[in-house]
Image (spheres, grey):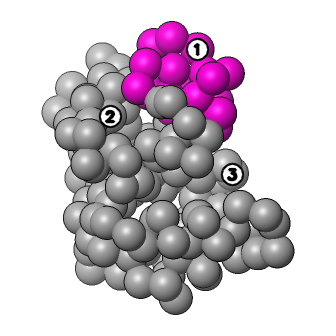
Amino acid sequence: VERTLLLIKPDGVQRGLVGKIIDKIERRGLRMIGMKMMTVSTHLAETHYAIHKGKPFYDNLIDYITSAPIVAIAWQGSKAISVVRQVLGSTDPTEAHPGTVRGDYGIDIGRNLTHGSDSVKNGMNEINLWFKADELIEWKRSGEEWIFEV
C-alpha cells in the first residue's frame, strides 16, 4: 500500500475544481487519509520545492503557491503514486490527455492545478512535511474487496 500527496494549487481552488479532482481520485479506489485547506507559508513552499531552487520559474512558483489557499490531501491505496499521476495527467496541460485533470481543466504550465508526488519515497517525505501524524487517519473502506485483488 502506497501513500501520496496531492496539492490542489490556488488555481484549482479558485476555479472551484476541488470536488471534481477528489471525485476522480476516489473513483479510482484510493482512500483519503488526511485533508486540509490552508495558506502556504513561504518556508513550507521553499522546503517543498527546494529541488527547483535556482531554476528560472522558482520565484514565481513560490509566489504563486503562497498567494491564495490550497488544499493538501494525503491519499493511500494500491499503486497510489501512479494512480494519482495518471488522474492528474502531464505536468504541461497542453500535453495532458483528455479525461485527466490537467487535460480537461488545465490551461498553462504555470497554473497546472495540482501537484502529485512522483515516487513512493517522495510521497512519504511530502506527507510528513505537510501533515502531522495526528492529522492522518487510518481506515478501511467497506467493500474494498470489490475494488482490489487481495
Decide which of 150, 36 is in the foreground and name it: 36
**Label of residue 119 in the image:** 3
Query: Who comes first in sequence, dot 2 or dot 3?
Result: 2
For residue 12, which numbered disc appears in the image? none
Residue type highlighted by circle 3 = Ser
> Splitting the image into 4 quarters, where does residue 92 fall?
top right
Residue 67 at x, y percent in the picture: 38, 69
- Mark 2–mark 1 Cα distance, whole angstroms, equals 15 Å
Q: Which residue is mark 1?
A: 97
Of labels 2 and 3, the one closer to you: 2
Q: Position of residue 118 (x, y in %)?
A: 67, 49
Q: Residue at x 51, y 72 (%)?
A: 63
Residue named by callout 2? 21
When the figure is inspected, residue 115 is found, relative to residue 38, above or below; the finding is above
What residue is at 27 percent from the left and 79 percent from the top? 134
Q: Quadrant of residue 142?
A: top left
Residue ranking furthest to the right: 54
Left or right of 147 on screen, residue 108: right
Q: Which residues are magenta?
A: 85-105
Amino acid type at mark 2:
Ile
Around disc 1, counting alpha carbons within 10 Å, would you say few (fewer than 14), some (14 to 19), or many (20 or more)?
A: some
Badge 2 element: helix
Instruction: Give the answer, above or below, for where 89 lies relative to 131.
Output: above
**How many neighbours does mark 2 have within 10 angstroms: few (below 14), some (14-19), or many (20 or more)?**
many
